[in-house]
């Protein structure tokens, strides 16, 4: 009898936690953006409208990636009302490498390791206050890790 009561209580607490969870935890995945084959299609599938260049976005990524399988990328900004951050690798077969939905309480600073098949421009797209901003950097991927 005790075991059944514990299982029932555990189920009730789990259901209550799921129902009380904030909406942003269950954000829809933009499948069209992740399946796009061009960088522009990926950006338009994830966001609406064009992005303007901004110097308020800090994109930290190495100039030369000696191992294209694990390229560290950090995107941060001090902009207000950041809603989303995306990382786009223009020459990858699927350009949208990562996308982060931000809550109003979160700090706009994300780090991720991406895979790059070849040298390419990498763009960080930030949606803040309903507008899109971007920063980009050219990254050279070397074969064999020789650094040249």
Image (tube, grey):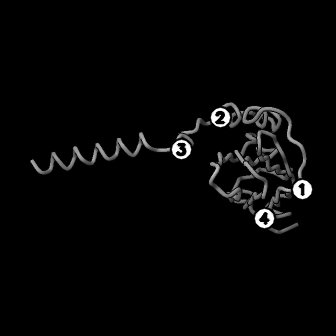
Q: Tag 1 or tag 4, which sits nearer the N-term?
A: 1
Distance (Cα) linking label 2 and label 1: 27 Å
- Circle nearer the N terminus (3, 4): 3
- In the image, 66 versus 123, the foreground residue is 123
Q: Which residue in the protein does label 3 denote?
A: 25
**Which callout, 2 or 1, points at the residue further toward the start of the chain?**
2
Q: Which mark is residue 91?
A: none
Position above or below: 96 against 109: above
The residue indicated by pointer 4 is: 66
Left or right of 112? Residue 125 is right
Rounded to the nearest whole Å, what is the CA distance between mark 2 and mark 3? 15 Å
Which residue occupies 43% across, 43% down? 20
Marks 3/1: CA distance? 30 Å
Residue sitting at the far left: 1
Distance Cα–Cα, label 3 vs label 4? 35 Å
Which residue was labeled with disc 1?
55
Q: Which residue is mark 2?
A: 30
Residue occupying image coordinates x 78% and y 64%? 66
Inter-mark Cα distance, 4 to 1:
27 Å
Q: Quadrant of the C terminus?
A: bottom right
Give the structural element (helix, strand or loop) at label 1: loop
Q: Residue at x 15, y 50 (%)?
A: 3
In the image, 12 versus 42, the foreground residue is 12
Q: Which of the marked residues, 3 or 1, is nearer the chain's N terminus?
A: 3
Crowdedness near tag 2: few (<14), some (14–19) or many (≥20) residues, C-alpha within 10 Å = few
Using the image as rendered, state which of residue 119 and residue 17 is in the foreground: 17
């Amino acid at each position: 009898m005790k075991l059944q009561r514990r299982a029932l209580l555990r189920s009730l607490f789990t259901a209550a936690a799921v129902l009380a969870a904030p909406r942003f935890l269950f954000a829809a995945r933009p499948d069209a953006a992740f399946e796009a084959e061009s960088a522009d299609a990926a950006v338009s599938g994830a966001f609406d409208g064009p992005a303007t260049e901004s110097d308020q976005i800090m994109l930290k990524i190495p100039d030369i990636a000696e191992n294209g399988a694990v390229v560290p990328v950090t995107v941060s900004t001090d902009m207000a009302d950041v809603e989303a951050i995306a990382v786009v690798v223009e020459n990858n077969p699927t350009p949208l490498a990562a996308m982060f939905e931000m809550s109003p309480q979160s700090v706009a600073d994300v780090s991720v390791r991406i895979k790059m098949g070849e040298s390419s421009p990498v763009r960080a797209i930030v949606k803040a206050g309903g507008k899109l901003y971007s920063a980009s950097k050219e990254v050279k991927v070397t074969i064999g890790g020789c650094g040249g």
